[in-house]
Amino acid sequence: VTDLADALRGILAELTGRPELLSVPLATPLFGTAVGLDSLTGTLLLRAVRARYGVDVADEDVNLDALATLGTLSAFVAQRATPPAPATPAPG
Amino acid sequence: MAEPGRPQPVAQPTPPGRPEPAGGPAGRVKCVVWDLDNTLLSGTWLESAGPPPADPSLLPVLAELGRRGVLNSVASRNPAQTAALLQDPAGWPVEFVAAQFGWGRKSEALGRVAAELSIGLDALAFVDDDPYERAEVANALPAVLVLSPEDVPDALGWPELSPAVVTAEARRRASAYAQARRRQDAARESGQSTADFLRWCRTELTISPATAADLPRLVELAARTHQFNSLRRAAPEPELRGWLAAAGYRVTVLRLADRFGADGLVGAAVVDTTGSTPDGPQWRVQLLMMSCRAMGRGVIEALLAWLARAAAAEGAAVAVPARLDERNVPLRLALVAAGFRAADAGPDAAGLTWFRRPRAAPPPELPEWASVATAGPR
């Protein structure tokens, strides 16, 4: 799950263009002001998760509770993921 | 459909008459993607001394598409330097958006056009003189309306290319997409949080009651929105007119502008304020919609914050019944981010999932770039 969380941090940092998200703590609310996930970045994140891990969060989780924090999202994906495709390196 | 492992389509000319797939809702095509050589241009660039002139028979077609609010894009195998040709304002009656150049399949180029414009593949038409290219796209992307250049003048009379309502916002759409492109580039380079970036853009949102003058744009917005449309359907003019006039209904519209340009009316909420639950009054949102080109600019967030605050000020709860599918996940994200939760019971008999905010939950703050007007603009 630690590797998975790091990979998800990489996705978040890449799609927002904000490298500081590479160190976002597991318990920080994603919809809160620190990360500021919105309908655009949230959609991009869900698409990236589905493409890389084959997990369709929106299909299974009507309230998107998995997006509460990086920790909940990592756990949700870890429970369902098929063997992940090789992760692309996080941007530096 | 192609079987797996059959990579190449059979090259064959589009059959005479109306190409498949036909039908679909009126005006479903939001963007026509053109080939260049021997389609938009009367010749082949790399075989000519200079860029060949535009095909004169297609210029009035482009102009008419522009008047209808249909965008125009390009998918060409020419090198990217060709793009300069498209930027000559004297040569073309419309602006081209999201143009694609280079080798690679045209179906992939069309996928990039759809992604860049945030529209579905079924909102694209593709025009190419080469029957192989048409077959490749028709095979890989059956949702795309595929046309030969000879089909095009005729196709202007087809429902797919005939939006029922064309507003000033729609006619401005091409330049709006060009603005959006500049804004996105600036956002990626800035590395700022969304809120900081919107502040830097000098974003201004104005929330006001709708007037009768807004009706055509509301009809168009309902017809064109998918990712942010709570009902996942169009609302015909009589239905919207009825909501505007109904006692106890409030139709609220949101206009957007920033340093890159004005977008006009990009979002709306139709609210029935007459309902109640055993706990007190409840506002029912009949229709919530936002243009996808306003995505990522704080619009849906501001609309939901306003809704929660306006209801709370009158002691009312807010319910948003929504028809959920894979297309309007962005709306669901916005609802959840604003503190709404879906009813545990799942969809009701009409297929609507009811999202509610707990009455006691403090409503989200309205961002400082949003202002609330008590009357519509004159």
Image: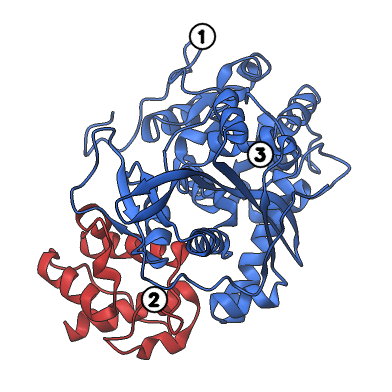
Chain colours: A red, B blue
Q: How many marks?
A: 3
Of residues B211 and A51, the one nearer the viewer is B211
Residue at left offset 62%, top offset 32%: B245
Residue at 67% in and 44% down? B210
Question: Which residue in the structure is indicated by mark 3?
Answer: B71
- Determine the secondary structure under disc 1: loop
Q: Which residue is mark 2?
A: A12
Calculate the distance from the C-alpha at mark 1 to the C-alpha at mark 2. 49 Å
> Which type of secondary structure does the marked residue at label 2 adopt?
helix
- For residue A72, the mark is none
The amino acid type found where label 3 is placed reads Leu
Q: Amino acid at mark 1?
A: Pro
Q: Is residue A92 above or below residue B46?
A: below
In the image, farthest residue toward the top: B17
Q: Indicate whether B247 appears above or below B329.
A: above
Whether residue B2 is visible: yes
